[in-house]
Image (tube, helix red, strand yellow):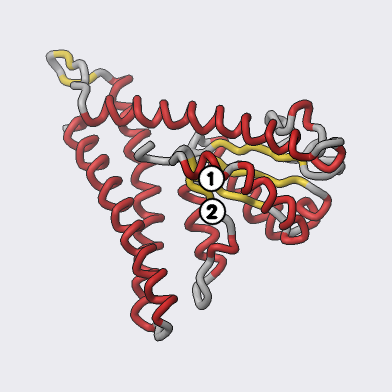
Amino acid sequence: MSNPVKVFFSYSHKDEALRDELATHLSTMKRQGVIEAWYDRAIIAGSNWADAIDDNLNIADIVLLLVSANFLASDYCYDKEMMRAMERHEHKEARVIPIILKPVDWNDTPFSKLQALPKNAKPVTTWTNQDEAFLDIATGIRRVAEEMAKSKASASSVVNTTPVTTTPGGITDRQRRRLEQERDSLQQQYDTVSNKLDRLRQAYSIETDVTTKFKLESQIKEAQAEQDRLDDQLEEIEQKLL
């Protein structure tokens, strides 16, 4: 899959062992290019960790909330990551999926109305065989990721190859609104990636460790490619709106 769905892990470090186990169960999807997963341990030494988290949270397609008492007690997880994720979910910019790791009262939380995993929102640690729980979670995430990938491909096809049906006065109001919404969403992603690219280049310019510079160079190339892709899509939408 040429454009993998970006997955962001929001979790408490006290639950890192369970996060790692879930990541292992998602590894096949990563290898197949279905998803591209990110979590805060991927932050390079010397980077601004808050900016790195914000950048990746703001471009994620799927946000996994790894729910436990530790997660709900964490001000950063709850007030920063979860609230921003829910804001993007409400604006249909991302899909938030609660993953119930441990028994905890999560009723009346902002995400309590969302469909949770594993099935019946049964906490992972209460399953007799936790591998079965993680398999159920992985299956659910795959279903959402493949659905989103198809939606992305369809939208890209409309923007890149399918002529917008026009009337003598141009495109219809409905088509214009749809294109404008897509443009605004892409612009937000473009701005986020541009900010990330600026910070990576700044970090690269002052870094002295060869290994770290190599990693930064790789991240710069990935961010540049993402920026170019978004720029092309924005350009084509603007042409449609003329």
Compared with 168, 156 (above or below) is below
Pinpoint residue 43: horizontal percent, then vertical percent: 53, 66
Q: Secondary structure at mark 2?
A: strand
Q: Residue at x 50, y 44 (%)?
A: 30
Based on the displayed image, in which of its 4 quarters is residue 127 positioned?
top right
Pinpoint residue 153: horizontal percent, then vertical percent: 35, 29
Q: Is residue 161 left or right of residue 6?
A: left
Instruction: Report which residue position mark 2 lands on.
Output: 38
Quadrant the N terminus occupies: top left
Could you classify mark 1 by the number of other residues whose Cα lies within 10 Å: few (under 14), some (14-19), or many (20 or more)?
many
Compared with 147, 56 (above or below) is below
Furthest toward the left, the residue is 168
Could you classify mark 2 by the number of other residues whose Cα lies within 10 Å: few (under 14), some (14-19), or many (20 or more)?
some
Inspect the image, locate mark 2, and give the three-letter code of the amino acid beneath it: Trp
- Between the C-alphas of marks 1 and 2, the distance is 6 Å
**Closer to the camera, 38 or 91?**
38
Q: Is residue 8 left or right of residue 107?
A: left
**Closer to the camera, 227 or 86?**
227
Instruction: Report which residue position mark 1 lands on.
Output: 7
Inspect the image, locate mark 1, and give the three-letter code of the amino acid beneath it: Val
**Closer to the camera, 137 or 64?**
137
Q: Residue at x 61, y 38 (%)?
A: 96
Compared with 199, 190 (above or below) is above
Labels 1 and 2: the sequence-earlier one: 1
Determine contact: label 1, label 2, CB under 8 Å: yes
**Closer to the camera, 8 or 136?**
136
Quadrant the C terminus occupies: top left
Based on the displayed image, in which of its 4 quarters is residue 131 positioned?
top right
Pinpoint residue 6: horizontal percent, then vertical percent: 48, 44
